[in-house]
Image (cartoon, grey):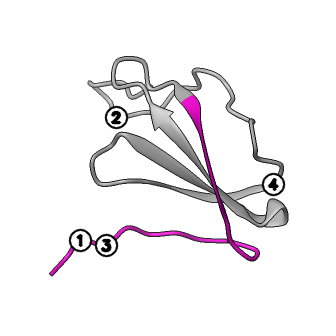
Amino acid sequence: RIDPSTGLLSVTGFATQGVNFPRNFAIDPSGKWLYVANQKGDTIVQFGINPETGELSPTGQITPSITPVAMVFRTAG
């Protein structure tokens, strides 16, 4: 959760489904999805972000990727 007055983050829970060694994460430009680089699991795992609470929900979208360690979104152009 983001504190609107300070911008500080607070823990709302833990999302571990499909992730055993999270190395990095990225939030897509829409702010709806969080992607986790699951380094030792050789996957990238997608979670939905609740816009009201910031809580994560597993989507079941798991993409194979050899030892992912970092991710970035770039805008077209």
SS class of the residue under badge 1?
loop
Q: Amino acid at mark 3?
A: Arg
Residue 59 image point, x, y percent: 56, 37
Q: Secondary structure at mark 2?
A: loop
Crowding around mark 2 (Cα neighbors within 10 Å: few <14, some 14 to 19, many 20+) is few
Q: Measured from the top left, where is residue 10 in percent x and y?
A: 52, 26
| CB contact under 8 Å: marks 2 and 1 | no
Q: Which residues are magenta?
A: 57-77
Residue at 82%, 60% (x, y): give it.
Answer: 41
Between circles 2 and 4, the one closer to the viewer is 4
Picture layout, residue 58 above or below residue 24:
above
Residue 16 location, quadrant? top right
Q: Which residue is mark 3?
A: 74
Mark 1 nearby-residue class (10 Å; few <14, some 14–19, many ≥20)? few
As measured in the structure, the alpha-carbon distance from the residue carrying label 2 to the one carrying label 4 is: 27 Å
Most extreme residue toward the left is 77
Instruction: Say which element carries label 3.
Output: loop
In percent of width and height, residue 12 lies at: 57, 21
* Left or right: 24 as drawn, with respect to 71: right
Image-based side of 58 in relation to 49, left or right: right
Q: Are marks 2 and 3 in contact (CB under 8 Å)?
A: no
Q: Magenta stretch mostly in which secondary structure? A: loop
Which of pointers 2 and 3 indicates the residue nearer the eye?
3
Q: Is residue 4 magenta?
A: no
Q: Is residue 4 left or right of residue 48?
A: left
Q: CA distance from mark 2 to mark 3?
A: 23 Å
- Residue situated furthest bottom in the rendering: 77
> Mark 2 vs mark 3: which is more N-terminal?
2
Residue bearing the label numbered 1: 75
Does the segment drawn in magenta span residue 63? Answer: yes
Q: Please give the residue where the numbered disc 2 appears in the rendered image.
A: 7
